[in-house]
Amino acid sequence: MNDMLSVKEAISSLLDSSEMLVGDETIPLLQAQGRILGENITAGIDVPPADNSAMDGYALRHADWGSEREPLAISQRVTAGSVPLPLERGTTARIFTGAEVPQGADTVVMQEHTAEEKSAVRILKLPDEGANIRRKGQDMATGQRVLAAGHRLRAQDMGLLASLGIAEVTVRRRLRVAILSTGDELVEPGEPAGPGQIFNSNRYTMTGQLASWGFEVIDLGVARDEPQAVRDLMRRAAEQADVVVTSGGVSVGEEDHVKNVVETLGSLDLWRIAIKPGKPFAFGNVCGKPFIGLPGNPVSVFVTLLVIARPYLFACQGASRAQPEATRQVALFSKKASPREDYVRVRCTADGLESYGNQSSGALFSTAWGDGLLRQAAGQEIRAGDLADYFPYALFN
Amino acid sequence: MNDMLSVKEAISSLLDSSEMLVGDETIPLLQAQGRILGENITAGIDVPPADNSAMDGYALRHADWGSEREPLAISQRVTAGSVPLPLERGTTARIFTGAEVPQGADTVVMQEHTAEEKSAVRILKLPDEGANIRRKGQDMATGQRVLAAGHRLRAQDMGLLASLGIAEVTVRRRLRVAILSTGDELVEPGEPAGPGQIFNSNRYTMTGQLASWGFEVIDLGVARDEPQAVRDLMRRAAEQADVVVTSGGVSVGEEDHVKNVVETLGSLDLWRIAIKPGKPFAFGNVCGKPFIGLPGNPVSVFVTLLVIARPYLFACQGASRAQPEATRQVALFSKKASPREDYVRVRCTADGLESYGNQSSGALFSTAWGDGLLRQAAGQEIRAGDLADYFPYALFN
């Protein structure tokens, strides 16, 4: 298998030839989830903007209680959102969670450790100086770099940007990925399937995957197995999209027209990648747009789009990082070593990973049955009880 | 800490009191990603519908070559999508990947193992009988249960449904979750923040989380710290939503009006959950709709919504399973045991998990900095090098 590219080599090679294919646009923060940040974000303010109370209680100068031991007069009441006066010497301020600590106070005593007496308060248990105060800038300080261009925005990042007062954000325009399938045997779900025909599933799997990664899918449907039909659709794909992805038709067979058409309109390399499922993989360009030719089998499409094509597409989208780290999980089954890196479809139970019986590249049910992929390295034997590399499908979303 | 509920007990208790709050609707398959299946799916056809060829090559009766060793006449050409004739005795059919195997043929020889001679073909290497044929029904057989009601649809499930010819699918109507925050200190990003004020981040974090879980978010904004304002907004929330979620204001302080309002409009229990960050948690109902009161600190909101509220909300949505299994990852840091279950904000590197320095519940940056949560069980000491329970954030999407 020395003539094959390893999965790692294939991904590196694609990344080496990648470049960002999209510009930027500015959108409201609430619409930015899942988008790729187009700018570096630096904190323009301190968060929190001032010392504030972590508790409902009383703000005081620590030394004032230490010396007196007499009830302290309550000189003001500070609620969240209000602006405190400087604290008068020898007094305390009633204060609530989130409220700004008055100038001069250095400690907050939680109310459970106090006893209010008329308009004064007795401290029952004095905490350390500085207690129960959230310091100005303790979360983020002015000038701190918080998120870098290329980062994919998640819920907590939206909260973070909001806490900095940012209402609009510059993100990368969505990458436009055209998909098309080939095959006279394909009919669409909902249509009647005659003898010799099967329902088109790759279109739906690919659309689902690409959409969940935040790309704009340009669905060109199915090209008949006929050179002119493939050529027309391929030209349209290249006109409308940033990247063109096909499933099927890239083998060398006389009914596989994709290869010839792409070679006419641009260029194409057939790669032999040591991956299972999904060996045949093509990369090139159509009318100047990057072209990825996936195999035709449903599981091969799913796995190669996920493992091989996804990092490249995220690079074209201007994302900084798209390959999740493998997690570790106990395998509940044994499996012989194989010369190709094998992505075994597994289900994750509380005890560990179970393997689906039919690991054929034609058995799409293996992917729907389970929760993720166990990665068996080339030459690695898996024994029941081993910790193995595991990629839950959700990690790729 | 015996008076506290464990995280597990809190989740169980919520699940026990949950019921599905939504009906069904039928939508096109291409729109169904991320939705919860509302029906059991049984295969109505065999997939594939007939034996087909896994290769480009020649279909024959295994016994025909075994006995003759003379080139076999090519009696037909079967492309994908066409309907083959029964194979004439002593002949072979030229066949392409995905094409239906002619009746009478039992083996496909890959073209690389043949030599074509005029209109006949010589077999150079005869595979085992049955080779290179994908059997009818090998992926799914008619009548097989493939997906159960309550399953959340992913890309591969869409492909699977398509391969069964299913164009429309019955899913649960999206759960409507109303969110509102309280606090006079809150201003919206984009507005000027005066002294004593901070930007509202919880609204954005919560919206992002709930939307990524497939729920319809009804954003009611911020209620002033004033009973009538809280009451009005709470009533509107209960009218419009299936579940009402708030952040902040459920403590017992005199400026925390949510508790009193909810008790007037329905009922409320304050739970002490042994979780860090995020101890105070309220559950009850407003005007007959389930009510969840999250703490006010940004990280507590994020973690309790993810860990405690999410399984409950998915149950209300009619989803069968919402709690991912923990994966295992090496901790690169040590951490003392604590009486509460601690969700440590970590970053996942190729070597293992790094912990963010400031684990304060006010430091939202800890969540944006990292990739997931290390779960430190109550009483568990973490030593650098230990395998620990790890939940990448993406697992929850």
Image: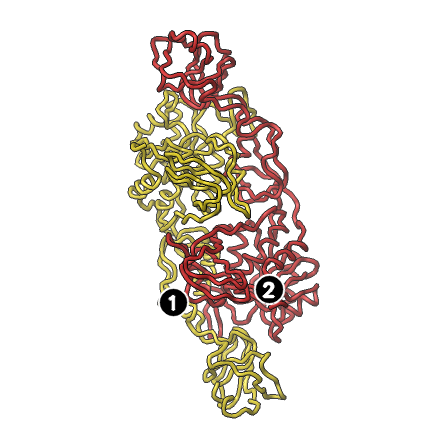
Chain colours: A red, B yellow
Which quadrant is home to the N terminus of chain B? top left
What residue appears at the point 55 percent right and 83 percent down from the top-left corner? B125
Q: Residue at x 54, y 38 (%)?
A: B369
Give amino acid for label 1.
Gly
Q: Can you tell which of label 1 and label 2 is closer to the viewer?
A: 2
Local crowd size for mark 2, using a 10 Å CA cut-off: few (<14), some (14–19), many (≥20): many
Residue B280, image quadrant: top left
Q: Is residue A63 above or below residue A46?
A: above
Q: Relative to the observer, which residue lies in front, A82 or A366?
A: A366
Q: Which chain carries label 1?
A: B
Q: Measured from the top left, where is residue B101 in percent x and y?
A: 49, 79
Residue A133 numbered mark, or none: none
The number of numbered discs placed on residues in the rendered structure image is: 2
- Looking at the image, which is closer to me, A322 or A257? A322
Identify the residue position indicated by label 2 in the image.
A273
The CA distance from mark 1 to mark 2 is 36 Å
Residue B397 versus residue A293 in the image, above or below: above
Regarding mark 1 in the picture, which secondary structure is present there? loop
Q: What element carries label 2?
A: loop
The reply to whether residue B37 is visible in this rendering is no
Q: Is residue A85 left or right of residue B122?
A: left
Circle 1 residue? B44
Q: Where is residue A138 in the image (x, y as percent from the top left)?
A: 53, 27
